[in-house]
Image: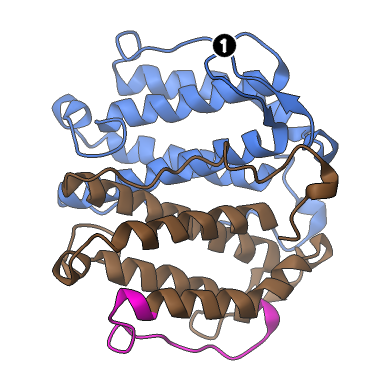
Chain colours: A blue, B brown
Amino acid sequence: MQLFFQYNWRVREEWFEWCKNLTDEELQQKRSGGVGSIIETLLHIIDVEYSWINVLKGEKIIDFTIREYHSLEKIIRLSGELQSEMITYLQNWNIAWENENATPPWMDGTYKKGEIIRHVIAHEIHHAGQLSVWARDMGREPVGASFIGRGFIPEKKAGYPAF
Amino acid sequence: MQLFFQYNWRVREEWFEWCKNLTDEELQQKRSGGVGSIIETLLHIIDVEYSWINVLKGEKIIDFTIREYHSLEKIIRLSGELQSEMITYLQNWNIAWENENATPPWMDGTYKKGEIIRHVIAHEIHHAGQLSVWARDMGREPVGASFIGRGFIPEKKAGYPAF
């Protein structure tokens, strides 16, 4: 499970770098599908991930609005801060928790923690796929989506990254 | 890992159903990003998954060309046939295999089986994200990408699906 977060966070870093070449107008331009613009997609990915992880942890939900996080710089900072906050929980993710229930306060229904963690993973990959089409619409090369070739499982177990 | 395949295959089924409302022209129309058309994306997802699973199994690679699989009907049939062939391997997926090496004949480089299985999972989710933008471009509601709410981890373990 952790390897998927490593992947998502690495790809997200690359999209952040990619976005540094765009104007504010390009970042904010309404586009078809998804949540409507590149900047809103990035904030949405971060917000949804953090909200669900807080559901898993049984902690309070915080909303991050585009009005407050309207610049790439603010979003990149927010992403880093929230990752630092979530990393311990994710590193300690235990397969025994998969069948435990969790209830998001913004929805009717209770879900298994194993469903929620996969939902978060799939959610970011899905939205990154949308970004890749918008990139081509803009005539730009999108960030690569490959999982292999990034060395997430290195040759020697001794060198296995902590996260 | 199996739950992600369940998810991808369920979402794929829904895209197949969704595609039944399109004309051949709409299915084949060149679109920006990805592999270029809806029908080619569906074949690409199926082909890439099957190729990598055969790399994991140490079996021969077969190419499926759009010239041969040019209709939705043929692609749906192919998807079902290949899933039947792969399901036993996926059901028996063992975490002990994660650090084993596998070498795809079409690339330079050796990858860990744990990387490859995640690559396959992320690959389909990524392309489904692209389909969702194209759907909106066509003024249509895309297939939902949610992992939760599909009952992949049911309440009682006794009712846990085999796959």
Q: Label 1 neighbourhood size at 10 Å, few (<14), some (14-19), many (20+)?
A: some
Q: Position of residue A15 (x, y in %)?
A: 37, 40
* Residue labelled with disc 1: A61
Q: Position of residue B55 (x, y in %)?
A: 62, 80
Task: Find the magenta span and give its range.
Answer: B56-74
Nearest the viewer among A19 and A59 is A59
Q: Quadrant of the N terminus of chain A?
A: top right
Nearest the viewer among B68 and B129 is B68
Residue A46 lies, with reference to residue B125, above or below; the image says above
Q: Position of residue B64 (x, y in %)?
A: 40, 85
- Observer able to see residue A128: yes
B58 in the magenta segment: yes
Which residue does the image show at 29% across and 18% down from the upper left?
Answer: A71
Residue A45 lies, with reference to residue A134, above or below; the image says above
Label 1 is placed on what type of residue?
Ile
Residue A150 lies, with reference to residue B109, above or below; the image says above
